[in-house]
Every structure is written in C-alpha cells, then in structure tokens.
Amino acid sequence: MNSFDSPRYPVDRQGAPAGPCAMIIFGAAGDLAKRMLIPAIYNLKQSKLLPSQFAVVGVSIEPYSTQEFRERATQSMRELSTSPVDQDSWGWLVNRMYYVSGDFRDANLYIKLEATLGQAKKREGTEGNCLFYLAVSPEFFPVVIQQLGAANVVTEDNHTWQRVVIEKPFGHDLASAIALNHSVAQVLRETQTYRIDHYLGKETVQNLLAFRFANGIFEPVWNRRYVDHVQVTVAEELGVEMRGGYYEIAGALRDMVPNHIFQLITLAAMEPPISFDAHAVHDEQIKVLHAIQTFSPERVLDHAVRGQYGEGVVGGKHVPAYRNEPHVAADSQTPTYVAMALQIDNWRWAGVPFYLRTGKRMARRVSQVVIRFRKPPLVLFRKTSVDSVTPNELVVNIQPDEGISLSFEAKIPGPVVRLGAVNMDFQYSDYFGTTPSTGYETLIYDCMMGDPTLFQRADMVEAGWAVVEPILDVWKALPPRDFPNYAAGTWGPPQADELLHRDGREWRDPIRNAPHHPASPSVPTSKS
Ligand code: BG6
C-alpha cells in the first residue's frame, strides 16, 4: 500500500451538499460532541451543505436509548446556542440521530453498531458511506480503530467510502507518533485517515494561503531579502482549567507547538504549491518542517525558553498559580509557556529567524503571525531630523479580532520632516460579517467531501515531533529550577524577552492597535 495515494473521489468544492453518509461519533456523550460537533452539523444543515440522505450515530458508554440521546442533544443545543435554533432544521436532524451504547473495547459494541448502520442506510438512504469521528481520549484511538477493522466496518468497496477522524494529540513524542501511525495503517489506508488539527478549521488560518497566493504583491517580498524576521504568538488567558491530568503529562510544548503552531509556520513559510490539491499543499508544508534547523543540546539551552505561571491577575481577577490548579502536582515542573527561535534552512528563509511563543494565563488571548520587514536605507532623510524609521509590519490576526494589518511610515503634517507609523487595517467582520461557527464545520464538510487538504498527513505529524524531540529530551534531563517564573497576566518569563534582545529585536506588543483596545497614537520616530 502506498500510504500517500491520491483521494479516490473527485473533490467538488463548489459549495454543493455532501453526498449521502452517516456520521458516527464515538464519545457522543462527551464535551467535544456536545459543544462542537453536533452544533457544527446543525450549522452545516443551515448552510445547506449537509446531504439530504444523512444520519448521526452516537456511540459511548452511557446507557442511553436513542430517544434519550435525542433529548439530551436537544437540551444541550438549547443551552449552548447563542441564537434561536431553527426548529425545522433541528427537528429534521434530531430525527436522524441514533445511539449505540457500549464499551469501546467490547467486540459486541461493533456488532450492534453495524446493525444500527444497516438501519440508517435503509431508513435514511446513507448508501453505506461512513464518517467515524473519534471524539475519545487518545488511548482509545488504536482500540477503536482495531475493533472497527476486526468488525470489518471500515473496508471500502467500489461504491462506498469509510473515513476515520482522529484529533490531536497524535502521540506524545516521535516514537509514539510513529507507533500510532503504524497501528492506524494496519487497518486504514492513509486516504481514509483524517487527522484533525482544529487550528486549520479557523478561517484566518486558511486565509494565510489565500492571502499569500491569491495576491500578486506580497509573494515577491516574502523572503529573506525583504523580511527581517517572523513572530508567531499564541497566547491564552485561560489556565489549565480542569485538564490538569492531561496537561501535566503534555505541557505547553507538546500541547501547542508540533501541531497548531507548526501549522501556522508552515503556511506562512511554504513555497507556492502547484495546486490546492491536498498532496501538493502537504508536500510543501513538510518541506518547511524538514528544513527547520535541528536543535543541538546547546541550541536548546540558548534558543528555547520554558515557563510556568505563578499566581497573578488576569482580566481583573486574581487567579492561582499553575501548581495550585486541580490535578496538578504541588512541585510540578510542567511548562505552561514556551518560546523559541527557529531557523528555516532553505533558499527563501536562510538567516531569517522565526520566533514563536505560546502560553497559558497570559495578559490577553491573542494569536497572530507578524512579518517584520527590513528597514529601508535612511540616506534620503540625511538632512532631516528623522534618525530612524519603524520597519513595516504585516500582522495576521488569527483570533480574536480576525484580520490583517499593514503598518507603514507616513509624514506627519507640518513644516518639519517627521515620520509616524500608521496602519492599514482589514477586519474580517467588517467585510464578511459573522456566521455561527464552532470551527468544525469546514473540517467535517471536507471530510464528507473527501478533501484532506486541511488535515495532517502521517509524515507531517512525525516531522513535527522530530523538530521538538531534542527540546523535550534536554528539558527532561535538566529540570527547571526557577518555576514558577512568570506571573499570570503577563507576557511570559523575562528569558523570552532576552531571546530576542540578544538578536537586537523585541516581541511586538500583541495588542498594539487591536480594534477593541485604545489605539496607540502614531509615534513620531524622529527627534523633534
Ligand atoms: C488545544 C489545546 O489543542 O488548543 C488547549 O489542547 C488549547 O490547551 C487549545 O487551549 C487552544 O485552542 P483555541 O482554538 O482556543 O486557540
């Protein structure tokens, strides 16, 4: 089997409803299903993208009947929806919901499931096409997939498709990711495997591709000749909430970097793909990951920073230190913050640092990619009072306040030559309004359509782990001595600032010029 064989079905992205199918949700009684998946299916129905021949089959350990499952789904839709639920659409959907209860490890569950799928096929006309969504904890991925294989419910024939969606974490290091990919590949072909990184469901992340490759004016300057450096910030106000058990083992590096942040970096740094075909896009993304300079142990010490939050104030509220969160050890050494400088050793980016940082309990929730351009020569202003200029900056705001802004220098009116930094701003909501979305609609629809572009290929997952593995190793060998080293409600530990200061640079204030914060005045960059 060639694990990267092409999708078997022509992908039609013209906005037509998907073809007949059933969506089977393992973990249907859990949070992801309630908060994200079922509302996303409803939103797809509202957007007329759901097939008319459709069924949802919930699977989990809770001993519900189909009727109870429908009632619970109705109840949570009512509670969670921020706008009135359309009764006709919801009624249509809920009548196509089925439920199967059982233990994921028990072969009998899969016999019951097969019978229910047969029923759905007959009643709803799903034609035997199935999208299995594993909204379960990761230790169950191999269990469910092996059982699906053993029960022969994921075998495709010439008339049906069977696809399986799994969501990160895909392993906890390189070896476990390889083992997981191997175990999945024993049952499924790569074209049946859809690895979700929910960052790719975000419109602004997808827009990075459109922005770069649907506009002629940016690509010529998108390289080492014009770009000084790139910054990626993914900051959260939330702490670890009730996920201490998972987070203690994962930590910020595993949780955010090889997946979400590497998606942002590969989309920002990749070469133009020859088409938007999944393989063409993935091939370019993986080249970026392979070009990232390997971290030697010395480089880890100099170019990677870890942090853990102490108590502090976030959004006006006092919050506890990480070590006082539920399910967290009192002497925990788990990082809740990571910053690092990457070098992408290819023709386009050699010598251009990519700085990234991510953390919990930071001053503000904000995710953005910043392209900082080189300064122009100042010869023109030799005989004026201008002694420096602010370099141009392109800021792609992923969330919140989704949009793009470009800063440039303008002359401040008056007889004295003085410059001020001004902004050209594009806000998504101004142009396109907002539509109800959980961020999973596109991903579910793409999966129904058989378009894997926004999903991670097996080799991409492994390449991401290969980059961070040396950092994990050094950090494991040298436990931190200064945790907690940043207060909740700040932008992280001082070492992260030093990381850039050493290179004569600094982090951009992520909320500078943010639309919902007081605009900073244009700063004259000349002596007055
Ligand atoms: C998840 C991480 O993958 O992404 C969480 O496990 C993190 O720790 C979340 O909070 C961030 O997602 P978003 O969409 O809120 O930026």
Image (spheres, rainbow, N blue to C red):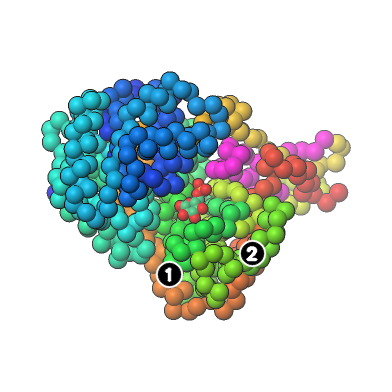
* Left or right: where 114 falls relative to 31: left
Q: Residue furthest top?
A: 88
- Please indicate, yes or no, whether residue 282 appears anywhere in the rendered image: no
Give the mark nearest the N terminus, 2 or 1. 2
Residue positioned 46% across, 74% down in the render: 475
> Which numbered dot is residue 320?
2
**Quarter holding residue 65:** top left
Crowd rating for badge 1 (residues with CA inside 10 Å; few <14, some 14–19, many 20+): some
In the picture, measured across the screen, residue 235 lies left or right of residue 244, that is: right
Q: Is residue 376 magenta?
A: no
Q: Secondary structure at mark 2?
A: loop
Q: Nearer the viewer, mark 2 or mark 1?
A: 2
Residue 472: numbered disc: 1
Q: Specify whether residue 390 is painted magenta.
A: yes
Question: Of helix, strand and loop, which one carries label 1?
Answer: helix
Q: Nearer the viewer, residue 423 or 220?
A: 423
Pick the front one: 63 or 261: 63
**As rendered, which of 106 and 54 lies closer to the eye?**
106
**Which stretch appears magenta?**
389-413
Task: Identify the amino acid type marked 1.
Answer: Leu
Ligand 1: does it lie within 8 Å of the C-beta at label 2? no
Q: State the predominant SS element of the stretch in magenta.
A: strand
Task: Inspect the image, locate mark 2, and give the three-letter code of the amino acid beneath it.
Answer: Pro
Percent x, y for residue 268? Answer: 47, 46
Residue at (43%, 49%) from the top-left corner? 263
Residue 336 to residue 121: above or below = below
| Front residue of this view, candidates 460 and 222 | 460
Answer above or below: position of 197 versus 83: below
